[in-house]
Image (cartoon, rainbow, N blue to C red):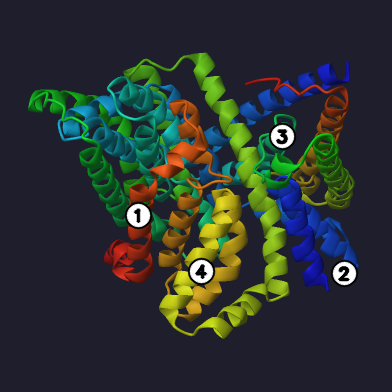
Amino acid sequence: MALTILCLSFFAALVLGVPVVFAIGLSAVATILYEGLPMAVVFQKMTGGMQVFTFLAIPFFIMAGELMLLGGIADRIVNFAKALVGHVRGGLGMANVVACTLFGGVSGSPVADVSAMGGVLIPSMKREGYDADYAVNVTTHAALVGALMPTSHNIIIYTLACGGLASVTSLILAGIVPALILMVCNLAAAYYVAIKRGYPSGTFPGWGAVIRTGASSMPGLFVVVIIVVGILSGAFTATESASVAVLYALLLTTLVYRSLTFNQFVTALAHTVKKTGVVLALIGISATFGYFIAYYQIAELTGQALATLTNNPWMIFFLINIILFLLGTFLDMAPTILVCTPIFLPIAMKYGMDPVQFGIMMLLNCALGLNTPPVGTTQFIGCAIGEISVEKVMKSILPFYTALAATMFAVTFIPAVSMTLPRLFH
Amino acid sequence: MYTKICATISRVSLKIATVGLALIIICVLYQVFGRYILNDTPTWAEALALLLVLYVTMLGTAVGVRDAGHIGMESLLAICPQPYKTWLEMFIHALVAFFGTCMTYNGAFLAYDSMGYNIPTLTVPEGLYHIPITIAGVLIFMFSIEHIIALARGTEVEPAWH
């Protein structure tokens, strides 16, 4: 009965439109009241859930991304990508994919990526004669790579949700190859559509321009190196690496690029506070939810339900992908990770999937959800920038969904794709 | 008048939280500095950062309620016709206000209950861990009521600070 109250109150609140953090909180309160336990337990667990040193990396990653966003790194990366691949057929589409991948490495967030790159490249592509739906689809799909990058705060969220079964270091390493595969698949999709629609090739500006623009954007991209090397070498923890990345981004944008004003710095802090308030509160309250998931053995019950359908591991993984995708279309990344990981990770592990591999699969699924209505955050931002309706964008989305699905199936069914680098370094 | 008060509180909360965030960054950087340069890792830095993050997060959460910044689904809201849509929105804000009340009461209870114990590395009362929940609860309640009043008047709550 308590389990029914928990699930029904959560989904009812969610469908009504109550923000996820309060939907989880209200369902936890309702369940606690039914069980006759003190309500203070919910808030005690919420406070405890937010007090993990590793989670401080989340505001730091967000802050570093905000500084890069406001500090003018975006333009430099776009210029470098244009010089590098702008001469290929559908050149601006190609440059878009490369630029989004590079900026995704800096920001670690698909939403920040599509805002920054889309803001520059979508209008530019439209001016050059590219269709708006193509420009939006290329940008929104290429931006998803940010979720897999070492600077992705969703990686930190997953380490919480999996209860320490996967380390930050392993996940950071595991995301690199899938991110590159996703970039290649996106390039292929963009190229295919460019040929089909007869988009022109650009002119190669010469290796001098490539080197010049590359050198200009390299200090910005170095933030990824700080995080990866800092953590891998053991010099810093993930949180400390992220704080050093913030300091580096601040020094770079104020002293080297001289593009960040004091007001922009304060704006970056305010944006970070708002986002932190959303994400960390969600993490805190999910600690209560996680407790209930374990207490009522929801993972085992779900596993038993799946086992009645099939016992084939590949089919189970496929079904988990479908469920995650469907939930991801309604929910944002953080709540999907926090709610679904404790339920589906034990099932996936039972059928032989590593928690690190599951994490990358989960991140990719959530990323796909960001580009799917009814709640497709990056897609909505892309459409707003491109001044085009979601319906029109959906009509030509298939090649890009195929690119994403190909990456997702590679991650799901070929463990080496995500597990080679973590195993190599451990 | 009520909206002006809420806007001012929201703006001040966000400014306090930005200072808090800057302090957290400084704490963690000082920890790195202490370990590698001073050869003396400050034990208070991590504890202080973990205390401050509660204040920053909870203030950010409360401001998020006023600025409608929290993640949620809008499926039923999107298809609901007027005037039921307004009533539904009011009901949602009432639920959030109720949760704010729960936060206030239970946060105050936990804070009062743990005031007699000290956080070892900071020598400040443990009750400070639970005060942010109480403050956020009060703010969430106030901001939700502000939204309900705005809906009743047919207006919208404007974010106090972008």
Q: Residue at x 54, y 53 (%)?
A: A157
Mark 2: few, some, or many residues within 10 Å (few <14, many ≥20)? few
Tell us which disc is closer to us: 3 or 1.
Answer: 1
> Do marks 2 and 4 share a chain?
yes
Question: Distance between the Cα atoms at labels 2 and 4?
Answer: 31 Å
Q: Which residue is mark 4?
A: A320
Label 2 sits on a secondary structure element that is helix
Between the C-alphas of marks 2 and 3, the distance is: 30 Å
Labels 2 & 3 near each other (Cβ < 8 A): no
Q: Is residue B77 left or right of residue A116?
A: right
The image shows residue A83 at horizontal and vertical percentages of 18, 27
- Label 3 to label 4: alpha-carbon separation: 36 Å
- Chain on which label 1 sits: A
Which of discs 3 and 4 lies nearer the camera? The answer is: 4
The chain ID associated with circle 4 is A
- Which of the two discs, 2 and 3, sits closer to the camera? 2
- Residue A212 in which image quadrant: top left
Which is closer to the viewer, label 1 or label 4?
A: 1
Residue closest to the eye, B136 or A79: A79
